Structure formats: C-alpha cells, structure tokens
Image (cartoon, grey):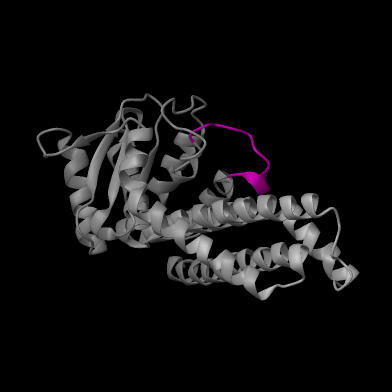
Amino acid sequence: MFYTQIARNKRNTVFLVCLFIIIVLGIGSAVTYVRAGDYISGAIFAGAIATVYTIFMITTSTNVVMRMNHAREITSSTDQAFLWHTVEGLSIAARIPMPRIYIIDDPSPNAFATGISPKSGAVAVTTGLMNRLNREEIEGVLAHEVAHIRNYDIRLSTIAVALVSAIAILSDIGMRFFIFSGGRNNNNKHPLIMIIALLLVLLAPIIAVVMQLAISRNREYLADASAVELTRNPEALATALERITDTHTPVEEASSSTASLYFADPLKKKAASLFSTHPPADERVRRLRQM
C-alpha cells in the first residue's frame, strides 16, 4: 500500500511544481502585457527572477533555519545517545549520509528536517518530543524527517518559497505599471486578455501561497509513506502524530516562516484547510492505518 502512495504522491508533486512554474511564467507575461502588450519578454523576465531567488535561498537556507529556531547541534553520541543512534540507523536504512542533529529546548513535541540535499541534511527535535513520546513513536517521527531529506523535500520547499517571492515581486511591478500608466496605450490590447492579465496580477500572491501549501501538504503524505517504508511500523507513526497534534501548546521557538517544515503544525493554529501548512492530522492517521 505505501509503495502505491509513494508513487502517487511523487506524480502529484511533479504536477504541482510544473503548474507552479507555468503560473510564474504566466504572471510575468501578464505584467508585460499590462505594460506594453508584450507577453514573451515578461515570461523571460519572470524566469530570470525566479532562478536568481532560488539560487540565493538554496545557498543560505540551512544555517538560517536552525538559527531562527534556536536549535543547538548534537556533535557526538555521548549527548542524547538514543537520538543519535536512531538517526544513524535510519540514515543507513535510507541510504543517505547521516544528517546533522539538533535539539530545540521546548516542551512541545515536534521535529523538522532541513538541508538542500542528503549530503547537507539536518534534523531538529524538541526536548518535548524526546520526553513525551516512547521510543517507537520517536523513531517514527525521525523516520518521517529522514524521509524528507532523502526525498529532497526541503530543496523543493525552498524552490516553492523562491517562486512565491518572485510572484510577489512580479505582482507588485504589474500593479505599478497599471497604476502609473493610467490605462494609456491600451489601443493595441485585446480587452478580454487585458482583464484576464489584470486579474492574474491581482490574484497572483494568493494563488502562489495556495500552490506552495499544496506542495507542502503533498510532501507530508509522501514522507509518512516513506517513513513506514523505513520502519515497517505505521501504527507507531500514527500514534505519534495523534499525541503531537493533541498537544495544544505551540512550539515557542517556531515562526510562521518555518512552520511548514515541522512534523505537525507547531503554531497550533486552526487554519482553514486551503491555507494550512499541513494536511489534516486525521487524514494522515487514516492513511497510515490503511498501510
């Protein structure tokens, strides 16, 4: 069952990323159409901005994320021996280099992974996770985070953030073009296409965030299935997810900009499903118990 889920989630992710890129290019085309009736140069401009932002964010992501969450690194097995050896064993099973390990001093149970590739992977767990879950549950959560690293999810999330930033810039430029042009030079523009272009520029930031969150939620399902592949223990992961989501205390060190990285929503917000950083916990648990 989990092999079917893995294959399905990978196909969904490819579709979402391709759609995201098409939206970025489409918004770039809309911007230059609003300005000068030209859509080709806008697509090229949008692609250049997205590429620059992606490279910048990929090269700076890991250290920044750990500092933002006030995580301290564990450098040997003498400190948190169970955590060290569990991550070591899971990384061997996943056939990736052992990730760097970090601890966040926070009583709320949670964890996250970062790193743009398995070679630069890192896992962070809260003290609450180590103190409040049993060993099998901790192993399940860690397997989920190791799966994120193996599946290149953090790189994908970083690319999604870069695309959102590029879309925000393009949308702002498009609105400035329209406002300062005062509707001039529209004689050669088709009215219907002009309306569509303006709507795309206006709605671009919302569309971008929804797409980013859709990618994030899909990768959570994939990491759950991959974790079961590593541990062969879906019940432990399901129970861990229930215990973490039943804890109503937020992770104080987490911020909205890093919330999507965590195993479960660290902010404990009751957001509408369309704008949630994570898929519904009940649905994740249901899928796990069907494996």
The residue sitting at 74% across, 51% down in the picture is: 175
- Nearer to us in this view, 215 or 243: 215
Q: Nearer the viewer, residue 35 or 243?
A: 35
Q: Is residue 213 above or below residue 257?
A: below
Magenta stretch holds residue 156: no
- Residue 42 lies in what quarter of the image? bottom right
Q: Position of residue 285 (x, y in %)?
A: 51, 49
Residue 92 position, x and y percent, is 19, 59
Q: Nearer the viewer, residue 36 or 123?
A: 36
Please state the total of marks drawn on the protein image: 0
Give the main secondary structure, helix, strand or loop, of the magenta stretch: loop
Q: Position of residue 273 (x, y in %)?
A: 66, 46
Q: Is residue 262 left or right of residue 115?
A: right
Residue 63 in which image quadrant: top left
Q: Examine the image and state in which quarter residue 27 appears.
A: bottom right
Can residue 34 be seen in the rendering of this structure?
A: yes
The residue segment tinted magenta is 266-276
Image location of residue 44, percent across then percent down: 58, 71
Identity of the residue drawn at 70% across and 62% down = 31
Instruction: Decide if residue 253 is on the left or right side of residue 190.
Output: left
Q: Residue at x 46, y 56 (%)?
A: 53
Residue drawn where x is 49% and y is 24% of the image: 249
Q: Is residue 284 above or below residue 225?
A: above
Vertical placement of 155 versus 64: above or below?
below
Q: Nearer the viewer, residue 222 or 191?
A: 191
Query: From the viewer's perspective, is 54 left or right of 113?
Result: right
Asked whether residue 156 is in view, the answer is no
